Amino acid sequence: MVSANNWKGRSHLTWSDIESQVKVLVTKIRKTGFEFDNIATVSRGGLVPARLVADHFDVKKILIDKNKIPPRTLFVDDIYDSGDTFNRIFPLVLEPKSFLYATLVARKGMKYPEQLVYAKKTLGREYVVFPWDKLESNRNSKHIKD
């Protein structure tokens, strides 16, 4: 489950949480037996987790914001929330059978695609704040009424 550091419907993850979740995610990726040549991601939430996962697999190059996802690609993101990112990325995959989508967090109660592997599930519908998006979260919270 995601960290219990929950404030006003938000769950704030620490760098320590992230390091632990990356280790869990890497273990789960290895257990799938999926062999990949590439790691890809989107430049917003996925950049930091992709870099951390790449370190574990000794991958030196990460494909970012590509219009085509080559065969044998591991796609890394921070959260599987609504499924929007997956649904936007999956049509770009050249060989869907050789594609794995890995996230640190998956929204509890969602229908997950078979290509998804994740480290942890949320406790519920709380908004997950990652260390790399604290400023964005703070800006957005000013527009939300309690």
Image (cartoon, rainbow, N blue to C red):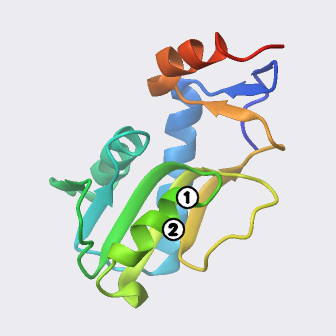
| Residue at point 55%, 58% (across, down) | 84
Left or right of residue 43: residue 111: right
Left or right of residue 30: residue 38: left
Q: Quadrant of the C terminus?
A: top right
Whether pointer 2 and pointer 1 mark residues with C-beta atoms closer than 8 Å, the reply is yes
- Mark 2: which secondary structure? helix
Q: Position of residue 41 (x, y in %)?
A: 34, 54
Q: Amino acid at mark 2?
A: Asn
- Mark 1: which secondary structure? helix
Q: Position of residue 79 (x, y in %)?
A: 57, 48
Along the line of sight, which residue is nearer the eye, 94 or 51? Answer: 94
Q: Position of residue 88 (x, y in %)?
A: 44, 64
Q: Amino acid at mark 1?
A: Asp
User: Which residue is farthest top?
Assistant: 142
Left or right of residue 127: residue 114: left
Along the line of sight, which residue is nearer the eye, 43 or 3? Answer: 43
Q: Is residue 145 above or below residue 44?
A: above
Q: Is residue 121 above or below residue 96?
A: above
Label annotation for residue 87? 2
Q: Position of residue 62 (x, y in %)?
A: 21, 54
> How far apart are the two marked residues, 2 and 1, measured between alpha carbons?
5 Å
Label annotation for residue 84? 1
Left or right of residue 127: residue 145: right
Q: Quadrant of the N terminus?
A: top right
**Mark 1: few/some/many CA within 10 Å (<14, 14-19, 20+):** few
